[in-house]
Each structure stands twice: as C-alpha cells, then as structure tokens.
Image: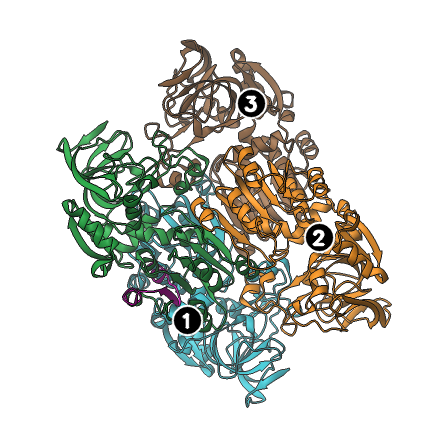
Chain colours: A brown, B green, C cyan, D orange
Amino acid sequence: MAVEIEKVPQTMRAAVLFGPQDIRVVEKPVPRPGPGEVLVKVAACAICGTDLKILAHPDFLHSPRLGEFTPGHEYSGTVVAVGETVDEFHIGDRVAVEAHKGCGRCENCVMGLYTACLNYGNVAKGHRTVGMTVDGGFAEYVINHVNTLYKIPDNISFAEATLVTTAGTPIYAIDQSGSLVAGETVAILGPGPIGLMAVQVCRAMGADTIFLTGTRPSRLELGKQMGADVTINVRESDPVEVVMDYTRGRGVDLVLECAGGPDSPDQAVRMAKRGGKVVFVAYYKGPVTLDLNVPVRNNVQMYTIRGEGRRACARALSMMSRGLIHAAPFITHRFPLEAIGEALRTFAEDRDRAIKVVVEP
Amino acid sequence: MAVEIEKVPQTMRAAVLFGPQDIRVVEKPVPRPGPGEVLVKVAACAICGTDLKILAHPDFLHSPRLGEFTPGHEYSGTVVAVGETVDEFHIGDRVAVEAHKGCGRCENCVMGLYTACLNYGNVAKGHRTVGMTVDGGFAEYVINHVNTLYKIPDNISFAEATLVTTAGTPIYAIDQSGSLVAGETVAILGPGPIGLMAVQVCRAMGADTIFLTGTRPSRLELGKQMGADVTINVRESDPVEVVMDYTRGRGVDLVLECAGGPDSPDQAVRMAKRGGKVVFVAYYKGPVTLDLNVPVRNNVQMYTIRGEGRRACARALSMMSRGLIHAAPFITHRFPLEAIGEALRTFAEDRDRAIKVVVEP
Amino acid sequence: MAVEIEKVPQTMRAAVLFGPQDIRVVEKPVPRPGPGEVLVKVAACAICGTDLKILAHPDFLHSPRLGEFTPGHEYSGTVVAVGETVDEFHIGDRVAVEAHKGCGRCENCVMGLYTACLNYGNVAKGHRTVGMTVDGGFAEYVINHVNTLYKIPDNISFAEATLVTTAGTPIYAIDQSGSLVAGETVAILGPGPIGLMAVQVCRAMGADTIFLTGTRPSRLELGKQMGADVTINVRESDPVEVVMDYTRGRGVDLVLECAGGPDSPDQAVRMAKRGGKVVFVAYYKGPVTLDLNVPVRNNVQMYTIRGEGRRACARALSMMSRGLIHAAPFITHRFPLEAIGEALRTFAEDRDRAIKVVVEP
Amino acid sequence: MAVEIEKVPQTMRAAVLFGPQDIRVVEKPVPRPGPGEVLVKVAACAICGTDLKILAHPDFLHSPRLGEFTPGHEYSGTVVAVGETVDEFHIGDRVAVEAHKGCGRCENCVMGLYTACLNYGNVAKGHRTVGMTVDGGFAEYVINHVNTLYKIPDNISFAEATLVTTAGTPIYAIDQSGSLVAGETVAILGPGPIGLMAVQVCRAMGADTIFLTGTRPSRLELGKQMGADVTINVRESDPVEVVMDYTRGRGVDLVLECAGGPDSPDQAVRMAKRGGKVVFVAYYKGPVTLDLNVPVRNNVQMYTIRGEGRRACARALSMMSRGLIHAAPFITHRFPLEAIGEALRTFAEDRDRAIKVVVEP
C-alpha cells in the first residue's frame, strides 16, 4: 500500500518477454509499491550482457513468466510513490538502482552477503533481482525495495546513473579481495564495460601500473584513455609474458578477471605475483579449467563475487559525482522504449562500436 | 497472519512492567505472528543484568509502554504457530533466541552489522530487540522473527538454551577481533556470566593460558573450574602486574573486557601485548576513561561489539551441543512466572551465589 | 660464531643424498651456528612426503649438492650451542622446528608472508628451508635460525614434537581463510597425516560436523577416532553427494583440500556452501583442473597456503601441550639413523599401516 | 663489508647531538655498510616533530650516545656503496627511506608488524630506527638496511621524497583500519604535515566528503586546497556538532586522529558513525582520556598504528610519482647542513608558516 503517491496512471508501456528473442512493448498495469518499496518512473535503462542471455534463453530465469515479465536491471529514474514505512526516499528523488535485494533472512543475508542470498528467486521470502526474478526497468514504471536504491547526486545524469552496477561490480571485487589498490599494480582482463570501468575505478583508488588485456583494438584504445598504462592485445602477444616482462618477473598485486573467456582464468593466476590476489569477476559460459598448481605454488588467493554487493553502488555514485570515474564515454547509443528491439540488436551485434546502449522510456 | 497454528489460547499470563521496580504478572492477549514471524510458547527465560536496568529505569527503553510491556530476552521454547512465508521453522520445533533483529534496510544491516542497526527501536521499519523494544519472554507466549531463532539440538535443555546469548556475546567479540584464539593467551576481565562463559568459549577454541580477574572468590573459583588457568583477585593483587609477571613482560594476545568497571578498561589495554587486541564486551555505567597513550604506544587494537551479532548464537548452540561449553553450571535458581519478583530479587541481590536465575512460565 | 657452546664433537653421522634413491649415512663436520643461529642436537626427525620427492628427484631442490646435502625438515632436539646475539634460546632448551625461514628482506617477508619468500633458496640473502635448501635433520646435529625454533613444553616428547609442522599446516590454512571454525561445518579431503591432523585441529577449535574423505578404510577409521563425524570412502560413494545430503543441500562452511588428487579440488569447490571457503592445502603432481564456474556461481572463496606459515607451529605446540591435539597416534615406526633407508621404504611403501616414520639419530 | 663502492671520503660533516638543545655540525668518519646494508649520500633530510622531542629530551632515545649520535629520519639521497648480498640497489640509485627496520626475528616482525618490533632499540638483534636508535640523515652519509629503502621515481625530487614517511603514516592507518576509503566520508583531525597529507591520500583513494579540523586558519586553508571539503576551526565551532550536522546525524565512516591534543580522541570517537572506525595516528604528550562509553555504545572500532608500517612508503612513492599526492607544497624552507640550528628553530617556532623544513647536506 502506497502512503505517498503522485498522479500515476493506471497503465503503462512496458517491454515484455514472450519467448526466446521475442520481446514486445505492450500496455501493462502500473504496479503499486508495498511496505518498504518505492515506485520509480524510469528515465533510462541500459542493456547488459545478461539481458541478451535472458532474451535468448528465458528459461535461464527462475520463472520466466512469458508474456508478463519485463527485463532490465540497470536503470535510473524518479520516485513517484512510496510504500508504507518508507522515509528513506521521497517523491521527486532521483534514484539509481542495484539489481540485488537479498531475502534478509537467510544466513548469508544476515551476515551481509546479500548477493549470495540462499533464497535467490524466492519472492515470497523477500528476495528479488529486478529485471530477473521480478519486473525490471524496460518500462515506464518499476517497483524497487529501498535497499536497492541510491539517490543520484545532482551532477549525474539519468543515463550516467545507469552505469552504477557496472562500476559497483569491480568495486565489490576490490572490497572482497581486501586490496587497498593504492600504489598496487593491477591487471584487468577483458575490456568490456566492467573491465573498462575497473580501469577507471583502480585509477581513482590510486593504483600504480594498470594492465588491460583484450582483443578489440578500439576497446584497448578506450581503456588507455580511461587510465590503463599498458594494453595487451591477446591476439598479438601472450599477456602473461608481457606482464611478467614489464614487472621484471614479479607479476601484479591484483588481477581482476573480467573477460570470462576460456583462457583468461589461467592467464589471471599466472600473472599474479607470488602472494598476490585474483578476483574472478566474470561468469563463464561452460566448464572452465585452469592449472590449479600455479596459484597453489605461488600462494595466490582467489576470490569470487556475485554482482555488485556490499553497497558498492553507493561508492560508485560518490566516485562518479566527484568526477573520479566517468560514465558518459560508455553511453554510445540511446533509443526510445518502443525501439527496444533495435536497441538490443545494436548492443548484441556490437554495431558502431556500441558499448552501452540505453533505452529511455 | 499465521498460516500454520496449533491450539493456542486467546489470552496468557505475562509479566508486565508498570513502572520503576513495578512488574506484575497479568492476563494479556496472545499475540499472532506476522509474515516471517513465529509464535513461541516460552519454556524458560533467564534474567540478565539488562533486565535489572529496565526494571529500575524503564525510560532506558525507547518506548517503555508502561502497563503493557513485557521484558525478558534470554529465553527458549517451542514453536506453536508460524506466520506467512515461514518454512524455516515448524510447529513443535524447540528454539532458542537472540535478542536483536536488525531492520534489514539500513546500511549497517545490509552490511551484516545488525546489532548496530541504525533504525534501533523503529518497529515499523522492521527492527526489534525482544524484551526491549518489543515484548519479550517473561510470558507464556512471545513473537519472534525467524532471524532471531535457532533450533535447539536434542541434547540441550530449555533452561540451558537460555544461555545462548551469554555465550554468543564473547563469541561475537572474538569474531570481531579477528582472533583465532587457538594457541593464544587470553585475559578475561570480570567473572560475570559473560566473563565465565568467555572462559569456556576460549578454552573450547583452543586457547593457551587463560587469565580471569574478579573480586568474588567464589566466582573466580568457578572460573577455574570452567577452564581459567590463572585467576586474579583484583582486591588482592594488581592484575596488570600479575599478567605481566606470568607472561614475562609480554602481555596477552587478546583481552576480553567483560567487567564494565571504572578501572577495567585501563587494565585491559595495559595487559595486552605490543600489537595485541582488546575487545570491550561490557557496557559502562557512565563516562569511563583510560590512558589512550598506552594502547597507542603499544599498537594495541581496540574493538567494540554490541550484543551477540554475526550469528554467534548458532556457534554457541553448536558448541553446547557438542559438550564444548556448558550452560548447566550457570543455572543456580529456577522460579515459576508468578514468582518473577522473587526471581529478580534473587538475581539482583546475588542471593545464594546466584549466577543465572531462570523463570519458567 | 658461536658465543655459548657445549662440548660438541668435530664430526657427526649424517644421512647424505648422493643421487636419486641414493642416501647414505656418512661422517660430516658438525656445523657452527652463525649470528642469530643455534646448533641443535637432533633427537627425532620424521619423514614427510616431500622427503620422498627429494629422494626420487634431487633436482627438485634449488641446489641438490649431491654428496653433501642432508635432508629432513620435521625434527626436534636440544640446543647445544647458540650463535651471536641469540638470547631467545639457551643450551639445554628442547626445541621443535618449522621448515621455513624467510629472507626477511623481500616484500613478502617484510609483510609477514615468509613461507612465500621471494628469495626462496637464496641462502646468501637469508632464506633457508631446512632439509631442502640447507642441511636438515637426518643427522646428529643441525643449524637453525631462531625464527624457526619453538620451545617444547615438558609434557611433549621429542617424537611428538616432530609433528609440529603437520599440525601447523592446517592451522595456517584456517588462519589464512579467516575462518573461526567454532560452530562451523568442515570437510577435510584426504586422510594423510595433514588431513588427519586437520581433523584434530578443527575439533580442538570447536568445529561442528567434520567430514573426512579418503580411500583407505583404516585411515578413515583413524580419522573417526580423531574426531571426524562422517567419513566417506570416495571409492564407494560420491563425496559431494554425501556432504550435500547430510547438510540438506547447504554444503559446508569450510573445505580443507589435503588430498592433492586429480579430482579432489573439484570436489572441494562443489562441497562448499554458497559463500563458503576452500583452502587448497595439498600440492599437486601436475596440472590440475576444476570447473571454475562452480565456485564463481556459488561465491566460494579459494585460498592457498605454502607450508606452516604465520607462526602456526607455536599454536600447534600449545594445542599439543594442552592435550587438544595428539601426535602420538601418528608415530607408527621408529628407526635409528643408520636405518634411514629402511625407514624411508617403510614410509614410501606404507608398510604396516605406517603413518609417520621417525628417525632417531 | 662493502662489495661495491664509489669513491667515498673517510670523513664527513654530520650534525651531532651533544645534549639538550645542543646540536653541532662536526667531522665524523663515514660509516661502512654491512651485509644487507647500503651507504646513502644524503641529498635532503626533513625535520619532523620527533626531532624536536629528541633535541629537547635526548634521554627520550633508547641510548642517546651524546657527542656521537646524529638524528634525522626523513631523508633521501643516492646509493654510493652497497654491502654484501645487496642486489636490490645499485650505486647511483636515488632512494627514499622509511625509519623503521624491525629485528626480523621477534614474533611481531615475523608476522609483518615490524614497526611494533619487540626488540625495539636492540641494534645487535637487527632492529634499527634511523635517526633514533642508529645514526640518521642530518649528515653527508648514512647507512640504511635494504628493508628501509625505496627507489625514487625520476619525476620526484629529493626534497619531495623526504615526505614519504609523512605520507606513509596515514596510508598505514588506512591499511590497518581495513577501510577502502573510496566513497567513504572521512574526518581528519589536526592539519599538521601528517593530517594535511592524510587529506591528499584520502582524496587520492576516492574519498567522498573530507572534514579537516584545526586551529590555525592558514593550515585549514591549505587543507582545503589539498582536498578537504569542510574545514572546522575548533576554536570557533564544536567539530563534533559540525560533522553531525553536515552528515545529518550519521557521522563519518572513518576518523584519522592526527591532532594528538587532549580533546581530539574524544572528538574522534564522537564523530564516527555507528559501526564506524577511528585510527589514532598521533602520539600523546601524557595520559589522555576519553569517554569509552561512546565508542562502546556506537560500536566504533578503534585502531592504532606505529609509524609508517606495512610498506606504506612504497604506496606513497607510487602515489607521488603519479601526481596523486603532492609533497612540494609542504616544503616551505630549505637550509644547508651547517645551518641546522636555524632550520630546527624555524620549524619549532613555526616561523613564516613553516610546514616542512628541509636540510640539504
């Protein structure tokens, strides 16, 4: 039950998934926020690689609810109604979101590990991942629990604020690894949006030399502009060799594996210094193997994360607002909601060097 | 709304606070569990020092609700009804409780720091401390959120299970300090229930020499039986001197300050080894001072806790069930609910060497 | 230069490696302790799996010095001479050893990570691993730096004290993982000496259910006697299935991978709970692979160690002295130094259910 | 014994302490580096508050060696000779120093806590603090152990490199506290050199709002230029009130107490958020008291450090070299060695808004 509400229409336009590769913009009822929840009028919603997986394999979701479900989890907008007990946000607040809300009652959530919630997908018990287990942001309106909302500082646009998860993910990786970053050498594998943002984040936290690996020259060039000191095209050189040469055989303090390729985990553990750290930020398509003997002999610690936990998005917004990290260079394309199909194809097919494609309902 | 419910009466007997030192057993409606909540038929509820504070100064509470409020936060019992969405517990389950449930939505709760909830006392937003901000266990029935419940292993009695917070508190202290305890020397200041249980906990985690300080010879003797190697009567000897002599000037790895006296914090920081750790487990009656220069020069880290956080009660129950820590020696007195006044006086006045006084509704 | 010295002969009997599988007891000069060093008269030296590797492949060592080098790194004895500046130990002290002394000047040593010393094998710079990069304990006398020595409490025999590394290794693993163990469920893979001792260590630190996997029924039986709750013969059942059944699909908090087999790492990551921890304690014979996607999706952190770091041996001795862990059941065979060949074969061939074979010079 | 040596004279000019407030520049033999040591030709040596303490109370030192001892611990220079085993540095290397070298053999050093060495002042056992327990940098030449040296990147001047400890100290404080800083609010008490540098360091690590307190308007102004968002003159306003107003009652995530005044510790614990952190960076002149009840009730963790540990100076140099922190604005005065008396007075009396006074031998 909403306790404070603006004039909100009864229905809205929303993208709905009807089957594999079948997404359509339809008319849907505007949802109403429950206790602890807020209704957000979406201003911008970016497309993420996970959206493509959902589109291709809706059964990837816990409950695809074909014909009903609206994806989209990287969005921003304005609060237009607040549910019972909500005083953290008010009508008119500009907000960015993080995807995960833990159930708040499993042992992982109680201990602060909410992205690894043991009740993942169990909406009744309080878990939700917007745009995955509940409706998301490719719509005019969307419901969010207060735990998943962050106020957007005035100097950040709605479009920029859609990048808050992209930035929160490498920040969470660094937090999980216990690394201070300042003065440390870092290797970042994979110049996707998360890898590129990781470059910016590490730079903003005081890193020393940053290495970035990838295959697309344009992306590596962009990485350089964003702060990478050394870029390595893995099609041209062995990235482990380059890093080892450059560091005179020492290796780097921290590796952020954001590539998700079949070889990148093995490269990651081979690049780390003796006693160094690797965080596996990416997900993998199938079984991935690495020679475990390498990190074992070199005393390399290996961390994993799930998404953008430990309120890393709050850190991301602060860093954006202070001009320490920049979202604007990522936003290469914008489409209205009705053109979501075109938007998805632009992203999927990497058209015109697309990095982030933003839908604006 | 309860979804599963046993035959439960409409009203019950419950101790209610009417004013300072004025607690009476009256007839009250039996509450009904909401979503995520459980109704517990109380089997045993122990008296804690905080209960005496509440009795003496009801305005110590966020909202004393005189004439309505039932204290008691160290209890155990049997689940007799479960609210919506609850599948973690079932009717008939024997359960122990921890006092704190965080709101689940402030930044501290989201990060796992639920005993330091920023919405402390805000029931509407989801915070509750049973027996303090909501009704507690000096009654036939009480409501608990699932986050605050732990199943009691078969080999632990209800009375023993009331000690789970007493044990959870020093366990949380150790967890917060990052200490492994195994092979470490530990000084525990104050042989109250928490200090004595701390002796058992440290012993069960593999401590080396355990020092215990206090003033009452009977308590120190008990501490010895529970595993302390060296007991120090602070009326007879300077505890810092004794510890330093015994450790040949090194000091101890870890100090658990459970005394809460005016001098004990200063003793704590002086007893720790250079580079050692102190946890302030006790609360203090008024301003307490210590010479900060001592820990600063000796590079001693100082930790604080609030209650029994980080699911330490689950660890406590496991350790009890495996016979590693023992609650039975603490339970010196038992009273029926109608004699709660007598029970409180027995505890307050330390009659017959009372340690823990248990009320059995 | 020794500053305090007992009557020590000029020469001694020592086992010397002459080539693969060629170890002979010969006469050698007794070494003299330098600054910060001590001369130990060896009382007992246990055989470790690494000794077999050295025997089979002397080139496994940084510098095998065939015809000169004496292996043996798990020993105990009595101080008979101390070098300059040594006041930590005195003639007559009974001492146990840890194998690793870091150089003390590389960045890893300075930060406390001495078993991962970057100057491994560089004796000139101060690194040494007794019995590997410098002469070890299969001899009447051996040199140790004070950093590698621990006084043996009176109630521990020399033979028992040779197990201090065996115990220190799982303790270091637990320390590295940040696990408290108390109240946690633990799976230990591999009932070798380190795995069996890990059972005892976890039990002594307050673990809840301990699972132990292996192939030899006698070892699993021994593990049960030492404190394992559930033993799993991996030839008869799928250990991941058993653990998951027993924990109702949750998995364990901590996995200590002590098996070093080709499948055990993969089992380890599959047994850990979502958000759990794995420590790879064993070394592997060749490239070992695991499906990285499992720990990534389950947010499992993966730690590695090298040997018995962070002064874990001091913890081990304390725990032994207090009767929390027991070395005696491990010592199945004893031989005089002259029978070292027989001793090595007994261990290598697992004769008479050998666990630890001790040589007594 | 030096193994590589340039033309170095037999004697040198050096400032020597003859008694309280009696420092004279005299002729002294040039020392020779031992194993693991390097001879540095000093280019610049900054004056630190500790130097004034030493000058006023030479007995503050473990062994003042009046008539012989040369103070000065914040210096930089060029390697002119290297001792045995040294391959980390070569003749001609430009180097900055950190003051502390641990003994490398006490339990604290072995665990990486070298600034809290248990053999502090014991030169024979390997401990040394340059300019305090052994001769320092107010001289033409000085000996350093390789553990205390860091190569100076080309784009940092010798004078700037003397600030490496000033920067290393707050970096170590942050490291000890486990704080990520990025996106966090920080209060820094005291705009001395360390406090001002802390402002820069926190800014360079991605801090959100930075508060700085002090009494001198010029210093607060400087702090603002260096990155503080809010400066508070404690003579004009209550700093706790200002911070609480600004943060709407929340308090800050991290407090770095660099003031060392009688009230600043109490302010520090009152400014921290519930669940926040305080690091006591400063030393205190005498007993200092604070109301412990405040951090206890607010679950505030309190950390201490000693100097610039955990190789924080390496981080500092990296950050300087990348232009993330700036030393130049600190260097207000320069004097030749012969004018050291004048230099000390300039610093002590705060002449001409002196911040850092550098002596150039």
Alpha carbons under labels 1 and 2: distance apart: 55 Å
Q: Quadrant of residue D307?
A: bottom right
Residue C41: x and y in percent read 51, 82
Name the amino acid type tagged 2: Val
Q: Are marks 1 and 2 on the same chain?
A: no
Tally of numbered tags: 3
Residue C58: x and y in percent read 56, 69
Q: Which residue is mark 1?
A: C347
Q: Which residue is mark 3?
A: A348
Asked whether the beta carbons under mark 3 and mark 1 sit within 8 Å of each other, the answer is no
Foreground tag (3 vs 1): 3
Q: Is residue A152 visible?
A: yes
| Marked residue chain, label 3 | A
**Secondary structure under badge 1?**
helix
Alpha carbons under labels 2 and 3: distance apart: 49 Å
Name the amino acid type tagged 1: Phe
Quick check: D350 above or below C298?
below
| Marked residue chain, label 2 | D
User: Is C326 on the left or on the right of A150, as rendered?
Assistant: left
Name the amino acid type tagged 3: Ala
Residue B213 is a magenta residue: yes
**Secondary structure under badge 2?**
helix
Foreground residue among B153 and B47: B47
Q: Which residues are magenta?
A: B201-223
Q: Which residue is mark 2?
A: D164
Q: Point out the image quarter for the N terminus of chain B.
A: top left
Q: Are marks 2 and 3 on the same chain?
A: no
